[in-house]
Structures are given as C-alpha cells and as structure tokens.
Amino acid sequence: MNLPNKITMVRIFLAVIVLIILVFPFHEIGFTWPTYLIGGRILVDLKYIVCGVLFAIACITDGLDGWYARKYNMVTDFGKTMDAIADKVLVNGVLIVLAFDGFLPVIIPVIIISRDVFTDSIKMVAGSKGNVVPASFWAKIKTIFMMVGVVMVLFYNIPTSLIGEGFALGNYLIFIATILSVFSGVQYYQANKEFLFEK
C-alpha cells in the first residue's frame, strides 16, 4: 500500500472516530463532556469541538492524498475507490448526526445522500461502458464549501456567531454546498445520459 492510500485509510479511521464520539451514549458510562459559555451566550459542548478538530484534520488529508498521488504518479484503482468511500463516510455520516442533533435541517443530508447515490450510479453505468467520469469543477467547489461549513458548525459557527445578533456562516456554506451538489448532479447526468439510455 503506497503513501497516498495510507493517508486515505487514516481519513477513514478519523471518520469512524468522529462518528463514534458523536453518537456514543457517554452518559451511560457516567462520562459527561464539559461545556463552556462563550461570549456570554453560546454554550459550547467540548464533544463537538473535538470532533471539529478531527474532522478538519481528515479534510486536510482529503486534499493531501490526491495531491501526493498525482505528483508522484501513485494513482491506483484502490486509492480512487477508498478515497470516495472515505469522503462519503466522513461527510455524509457527520451530516446525518448534525441533523439528528438539531444543528441542520434533515433535508440537507437527504438531498446530499440522494445526489451521491444518483451520481455514483451514473459513474458506475458510464464506467461499465468504458467512460471514466471525473469530478466536475462544481463538485469540487461543493466539497470545499461542505467541509468548511461542517467544521464551522461543529465549532458552533464561532467567531461569526458572536458578531452582532450572530451569523451562522457554516450553515449557509452547507446550504450553498447542497445547491451546488444538485447542480453538479444535473451536470453529471447531462454529460453522461447517452450511456444511461443506450442499448
């Protein structure tokens, strides 16, 4: 296993750790995460801050493994597959938990996951007919907006939430990323629809 693939596996490991921290019933083992009042009005649960730090590190590895693989010609089919799985586990898993915990509307993960299933199906059909479907420009922008947005939500949108009446910048970035995900999904369909309907 080359270095980029090892970095990808680290991201999967971090994704699993983040999800375990977010969903594990710590109260049942007598452990309570400390909370802090920030700016006199935002009650911050340390659990989400820890997950925000780990999530941010995982996001950095997302760019690092791809860059290293391309630079040193270490791109492999295993790496491509695991990279996609790592991203889905990391982002979609955290979106589901954030929606369940009330940080995001439930419709956000529903749209994102539905779009992922749709585009992955297109890629599989096109791939079975010899056409490789690369990530589009808008899909990459969507990923950046989504990852930054999720980090900010896990950090309670600090510092923007402390300005004036409070501004949930992370939530807006995730909303924009959701729109971009739908837009890029339509692009994938338009670019590959001949593969979907050919006999």
Image (tube, rainbow, N blue to C red):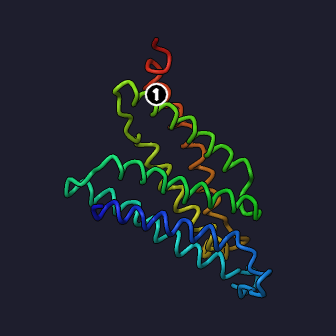
Considering only vertical position in the picture, is 58 above or below 115?
Answer: below
Please state the horizontal and vertical placement of residue 27, each as a whole percent of the image: 79, 81
Please state the horizontal and vertical placement of residue 149, each as a whole percent of the image: 57, 61
Work out which quarter of the rendered image holds the N terminus and state it: bottom left
Considering only vertical position in the picture, is 36 above or below 184?
Answer: below
Q: Nearer the viewer, residue 15 or 162?
A: 15
The residue that mark 1 highlights is 125
Crowd rating for badge 1 (residues with CA inside 10 Å; few <14, some 14–19, many 20+):
some
Amino acid identity at mark 1:
Val
Give SS at disc 1: helix
Q: Quadrant of residue 38?
A: bottom right
Q: Nearer the viewer, residue 46 or 161?
A: 46
Q: Residue furthest left?
A: 72
- Residue at x 37% of width, y 39% of height: 134
Considering only vertical position in the picture, is 108 above or below 128?
Answer: below
- Residue at x 61% of width, y 78% of height: 49
